[in-house]
Image: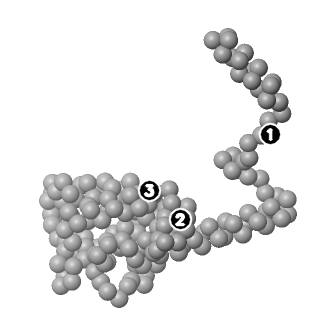
Amino acid sequence: MKLTCPACGAVASAEAWQADANARQALKIISELPGGVARNFLGYLALFRPAGGRGLSWKKALRLAGELAVLVGESHIAHDKKPARKNHAEAWARAMERVIETPPRRLPLKSHGYLKAVAYEIADEMDKQAEVKRNRAENTGRYRPKRDEAEPAPINESVEEMLARIRGRAGSS
């Protein structure tokens, strides 16, 4: 049985793809990507297909999948000397959809740079929306900080009491 990849155009038997270590590893990485990113990956991968109808090699697909997994897994996204924004898998998934729907004029893509720029714009917009929502909640008195945002509880003991407590622990060891 011959299989044709709808994204890269590669044609091979199912056994050949199963026997190819790069294919197996690339598919494993893709399957471990967050939902929306994994769903959009093959369509995005097609933007890297070489001109002239040749198929994309599994070695290159593996490299691209690995690079994208690193980008999606980082805690923050930064682009073009702008302030870093909190990284969201949703931003990458939406960026991939946008790039697939409206690809750049120059294809094939050479790197994830264009996708990263689009993902940064989306993450920036998500940050703005979250800040507006938080400000509204603060202004109406309905804001409750998340546990990691909460300020530490004030210390209600004097320095002397604190030192006595610490000394007491050290003496009881």
Pick whichever, 173 or 51, lies toward us. Answer: 173
Q: Secondary structure at mark 2?
A: loop
- In this orientation, which residue lies closer to the viewer: 125 or 78? 78
User: Residue lying furthest front in this view?
Assistant: 160
First of labels 2, 1 by sequence position: 2
Q: Is residue 159 above or below residue 2?
A: above
Decide which of 59, 159 is in the foreground and name it.
159
Q: Residues within 10 Å of mark 2 (few under 14, many from 20)?
A: some
**Residue placed at 43% from the left, 82% from the top?**
101
Looking at the image, can residue 95 be seen? no
Residue at 21 percent of width and 72 percent of height: 56
The residue that mark 3 highlights is 73
What residue do we see at 46% from left, 78% from top? Answer: 98
Kind of element beneath mark 3: helix
Whether the residues at callouts 2 and 1 have beta carbons within 8 Å, the answer is no
Q: CA distance from mark 3 to mark 2?
A: 14 Å
Q: Give the position of the C terminus as an image quadrant.
A: top right
In the picture, measured across the screen, residue 39 lies left or right of residue 159, that is left
* Numbered disc in front, either 3 or 1: 1
Q: Which residue is mark 1?
A: 154
The residue identified by callout 2 is: 84
Residue type at mark 3 is Gly
The nearer-to-camera label among 3 and 2 is 2
- Estimate how packed mark 3 is, as few (under 14), some (14 to 19) or many (20 or more) residues with alpha carbons within 10 Å: some
- Amino acid at the residue labelled 1: Pro
Residue type, mark 2 in image = Ala
Secondary structure category for the residue under label 1: loop
